[in-house]
Image (cartoon, grey):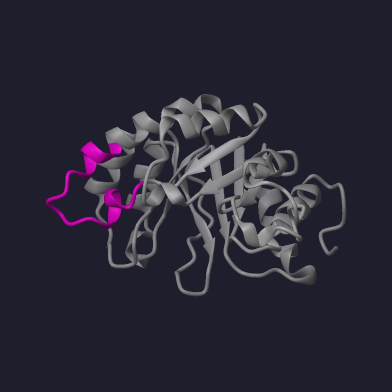
Amino acid sequence: MLFAGTSGFSYASWKGTFYPANLAGSKMLGYYAERLNGVELNGSFYRTPPEATLLKWASETPPGFRFCMKANRGLTYSAEAFDRVGLARIFTQRIAVLAERLGPVLLQFPPVRQKNLTLLDSLLTTLARPAAVEFRHESWFDDDTYGVLREHDSALVVTDEEKWPRAPLVDVSSVAYFRLRRGYPGASLRAWTAEVRSALASHQEVHVYFRHDPESPALARRLLRAAAGAEPVSR
């Protein structure tokens, strides 16, 4: 199953491009979910949405829709003395109300955080659900890290972003996760669509999320159609 969308959905600047110009903010998620089947929520990196908000979002989306919540920054950006495991426990309990609409948790490590397998294992153990892990330091990209990810059925995030090292395409989970952070005019999406198609052949779920630009919802819709063979990739 392919889930594709953008990083967030509630952007007034998208009115007149993706959203109708007069669409109320309260109607954005419903409109989005009629056209795309997944969203990566980066706001939870700073503050976990209240339970009432999460339940409202679940009620406004179909059963096949997925929310990929970005884990709180305290889990990976905090100092050594911080209770990361305690925060991970609270975070995973709070987002559980999304139930079957909850996709893999995006766990992002900063570029200053070098490989720490004990930390990685403890966080994935406490989150107790599939995660997609994004590393921004090259020291993580080795067999020891991949072994921990396999133990927890957690994906290695492949990020297309000039500032960060790109993870290799290593099969460590039943889930594949791509973050496409550039613009993709014309036929430039062709290579990534081929990668997504390949991942679909060997994974139960594939998630692809574009950056929060007004043009990104159209890119995600194009990818969904092209990966399914509904239109040529070069369109």
134 above or below 136? above
State left or right for residue 47 relative to residue 191: left
- Give the residue displayed 65% in from the left and 62% down from the top: 13
Quarter of the figure with the C terminus: bottom right
Query: Would you identify the image quadrant in which residue 128 lies?
Result: top left
State left or right for residue 119 relative to residue 230: left
Quarter of the figure with the N terminus: top right
* Residue 201 visible somewhere in the drawing: no
**Is residue 172 part of the magenta span, yes or no?**
no
User: 46 or 11, which is in the foreground?
Assistant: 11
User: 31 or 75, which is in the foreground?
Assistant: 31
State left or right for residue 104 relative to residue 65: left
* Residue 162 visible somewhere in the drawing: yes
Q: Residue furthest bottom?
A: 162
139 above or below 26? below
- What percent of the width, then of the height, locates residue 194? 72, 56
- What percent of the width, then of the height, locates residue 145? 35, 51
User: 114 or 81, which is in the foreground?
Assistant: 81
User: 116 or 45, which is in the foreground?
Assistant: 45
Q: Which residues are magenta?
A: 72-88
- What percent of the width, then of the height, locates residue 86? 21, 37
Q: How many marks?
A: 0
State left or right for residue 113 relative to residue 104: left
- Give the residue displayed 57% in from the left and 30% down from the top: 58
- Give the residue displayed 52% in from the left and 61% down from the top: 159
